[in-house]
Amino acid sequence: MKVAITSTGNSLISKVDQRFGRCAYFVIYDTVTKAMEFIPNAGIHAEEGAGSAAVQLIASRKVEKIVSVEFGFKVKPLLDSLKIQMISIKGEHTVQEIIDMIEKS
Amino acid sequence: MSPRHKRIRKILNIPLMKGFKPYGNQILQEEKRELITLYYEEYEAIRLCDYEKKNHCEASELMQISRPTFTRIYADAREKIAQALVEGKQILIEGGKVYFDSDWYHCSGCTCHFNNPNKEQDVLVCPLCGGKEIHKVEETKTGCVKRF
């Protein structure tokens, strides 16, 4: 299963980005192969439609779960129809902490 | 004057299939058959009323529309299905003014919120920390998920 985490930077010690559509990087973590992929988000400075573009990117990688803080109102119904789970985590966490949590469960 | 806008109807899931086809010799001979388009909201009305056995009032609340609107959608749906059944037409389920929604949960273990995209299955553990202390976030009156 693949999990996407929004990140502020391209390393494991980066913090989780507060926004889904306009995050700096997407970290795509594969729980089976333990492979990690950092994808820079092209829509970071987009005027509008950043969320939908991000959903397209995520859906093309066959991600099943997304960890972020805030999801935009346009993104929620899109992800619902694609059956992608949204996980909204409060507080400051690094990407490494999130991956550790997923691994433990 | 422009017509009144349609309120967006809330549906749980898209149907498992795209439509239905009649079978039998008579039908197969006539290749050019019209399609009947059943909208998603009409499918949802049939599902809520006849499959889940809810009354129109309960069903209309679930779809975030008024009771008379629900009854109208339901009547249209039955009319289309009856027409397809009698005239041997194909049913295509698509379109309509709908949006999707899912239930939200809160985990006390890692203080995260998450939704359940697979509505047929109940969630028992937190997808992040695997904790069992989860509870459903109650929806507000407007049907929107509370901001957090």
Image (spheres, coloured by chain):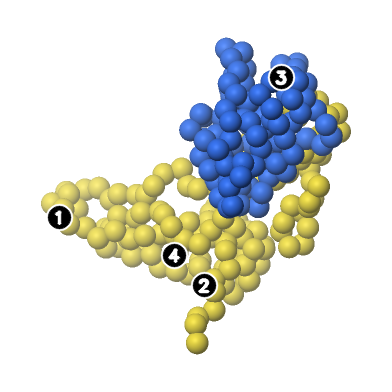
Q: Which residue is mark 1?
A: B30
Amino acid type assigned to the residue bearing label 2 in the image: Arg
Residue B72, labelled with which disc? 2
Tell me the distance, in whole angstroms, between the alpha carbons under discs 2 and 4. Answer: 10 Å
The answer to whether the residue labelled 4 contacts the one labelled 1, judged by CB atoms less than 8 Å apart, is: no
Amino acid type assigned to the residue bearing label 4 in the image: Arg
Name the residue located 58 percent from the left edge and 35 percent from the top edge: A41
Q: Which residue is mark 3?
A: A12
Name the residue located 30 percent from the left edge and 49 percent from the top edge: B21
Q: Position of residue B78 (x, y in %)?
A: 44, 65
Which of B24 and A105 lies nearest the eye of the viewer? A105
- In the depicted structure, whether residue B53 falls above or below residue B2: above
Q: Nearer the viewer, mark 3 or mark 4?
A: 3
| Image hue for chain A | blue
Q: Secondary structure at mark 3?
A: loop
Name the residue located 57 percent from the left edge and 62 percent from the top edge: B9
Return the residue found at the far bottom.
Answer: B1
| Image hue for chain B | yellow
Tell me the distance, in whole angstroms, between the alpha carbons under discs 2 and 3. Answer: 54 Å
Q: Chain of mark 2?
A: B
Q: Earlier in the sequence, mark 4 or mark 1?
A: 1
Disc 1 and disc 3 on one polypeptide chain: no
- Circle 4 Cα neighbour tier, 10 Å, few/some/many (<14 / 14–19 / ≥20): some
Amino acid type assigned to the residue bearing label 1 in the image: Glu
Q: Position of residue B30 (x, y in %)?
A: 14, 55
- Circle 2 Cα neighbour tier, 10 Å, few/some/many (<14 / 14–19 / ≥20): few
Q: Earlier in the sequence, mark 2 or mark 4?
A: 2
- Circle 3 Cα neighbour tier, 10 Å, few/some/many (<14 / 14–19 / ≥20): some
Amino acid type assigned to the residue bearing label 3 in the image: Leu
Q: Is residue B72 visible?
A: yes
Which of A22 and A5 lies nearest the eye of the viewer? A22
Residue B78, labelled with which disc? 4
